[in-house]
Image (cartoon, helix red, strand yellow):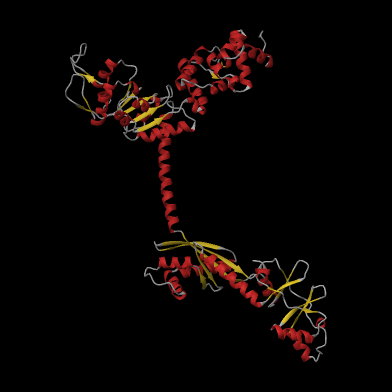
Amino acid sequence: MKVINFASPNPISLNEQESLATAACTFLENGIDGAPVINEKGDIVGIFTKNHLYRAIVGGISFNVRVELLMKREVVTIKADQHVEKAWQMAWDYKVGRLPVVDETGKLLAMMTRTDLVHAFEMFYNDLDAIINSSYDGIVVVDRHGEPVKFNDALKKLVRIMDKDGQNLNTDSVIDELMHKSGLKAAIRDVSLRAMQKKRPVSFIKSFGTFKEILFTANPILFKEKSEVFRVMVNCRDITDLTNLKKELQTSKKLTEVYQQELEKLRSEWLGQTIVCNSKKMREVIDLTIRVAKVDSTVLILGDSGVGKEVVAGLLHKAGNRSKHPFIRVNCGAIPENLLESELFGYEGGAFTGARREGKPGMLELAHNGTLFLDEIAELPQALQVKLLTVIQEKVVTRLGGTKPIQIDVRILTATNRDLYLLVEQGLFRADLYYRLNVIPIVIPSLKERKEDIPFLISHFLKKFNEKHHQVKSIDPGAMDILYHYPWPGNVRELENLVERLVVITPGDIIVTKDLPINVLNKCSGFNDKGPVSEKEIIKELYHRLRSTRKVAEALGVNQSTIVRKMKKYDISKEG
């Protein structure tokens, strides 16, 4: 706070022209032993005290002499807007008991007396005491010998926790005794003496058996003029819980590293030539797939047609515990309904016309100890949905025409590009089977949602089909850019088929823009905000291929006048 808030207002002062007798009367009437001396302008020019009067009496000086002849002219003053701590420092430095308070021009405003200084110090001490006690950490103030002279409530609480006998902590002597008994006092003394010696903050951690771990930090407090330490403030922080948490985090981190190493091992072992992914979304799918592969829960793989659901199903099998046993895939939408039941469940000899005499095991039996992948599960007839539910629940299968249940151990994986939940609401798919299949859903994003994968997939398929067809084809950056912006409605399957077509039919070793199909160029044109460079190349290639601005306009879905204007803008020759 500012000095003016503590100083006494309307200070008693002496005029430099007044006599010693007037000064003596002023002192007696007001019970003071000194006063500042001012001139006619109100400026402080000196200070006059009882000591000056005593010297005058001893020296035989007349009391008619003016104050200005005996006053002390070097006056220590303080500005009204300065902090009260400055007043304490000045009183200490100049060994004075009062300080005249002046404004910016030097005129006397108030007087800071000993009483004012003590009052201000008491208020500051009480504020400081409240601040220290509000600290969460234990705080101890020690003297230059390392002995505690003050501690806060948090320190008392810490001592209480460390006191196994639960003694009363109402007195400082009991606290001091318990600090000594627990070893806390010795640690505080040690860290404070180190800080005094080094004249800088010192910290160390000390364990008290298996009970507590405390961080001690000692900050030395120095006399400014002598740079000597006269107090040390020691902060005691209980870090037991923090240390335990750190150990738990380290253990968790090591466990995570083990899991991560296993995931990376599985990636390198199984992804290789099977799955190509660079996008965050697809990496999350792969990580989930590898984690789920280790359990036998049923998995429902969801995603648009061509995203690679069968590849994820294969990875679930290869990375799982059943990898050495059969992996059988059944496309529920590709097999006629009258044949699907016998394919899945098998049949006994003579079960129906044309059946083998010895009968035939179904796919569920053949997949025993392995994995059965039912693709396009939404196409499974409702009559077979009931039988499949029984197989999942009871782990037995009964052949067509048979009566003997056959025990099987099969992991069921399913996939669909349709909304199964909507089919359940429409009554087209059994709800009980849906919930049995949808234990762990894995959703594969479409290719347009993970465009970062497109260049890597193109490179992968180029390598694959170059080896297959004994070619050395590569792709031009411009063509790669167009393929990157193409929406790929058929997803990875469409991309794979297109790359194989380009490898086979492209005349040169470098696949360029003009080699791309018209439908790809159409959907990737500059008219869909793909940039003017691609726009120029697309119009140029289409025109040289179709030789008609009308046909180019039809291919791109724009007006013929737009194509004519664009060709003129890009200087595309009709003759080239």
Location of residue 268 with respect to 137 vertically, above or below? above
Quarter of the image where the N terminus is located? bottom right
Which image quadrant is residue 325 in?
Answer: top left
Q: Is residue 414 above or below residue 174?
A: above
Q: Position of residue 107 (x, y in %)?
A: 77, 70
Residue 517 in sight in this render: no
| Residue placed most toward the observer, 527 or 201 | 527
Relative to 269, say whether 169 is above or below: below
Going 36% across and 33% down the picture, which residue do you hit?
440
Where does residue 355 sit, x and y in percent of width and height?
Answer: 21, 13
Query: Residue at the spot x=76%, y=84% of the render?
Result: 23
Which of the 4 quarters of the picture holds residue 13? bottom right
Position of the C terminus, as image quadrant, is top right
Between residues 59 and 264, which one lies in front from this camera angle?
Answer: 59
Depth check: give the residue in front, 250 or 408.
Answer: 408
- Determine whether, in the image, residue 547 is placed left or right of residue 453: right
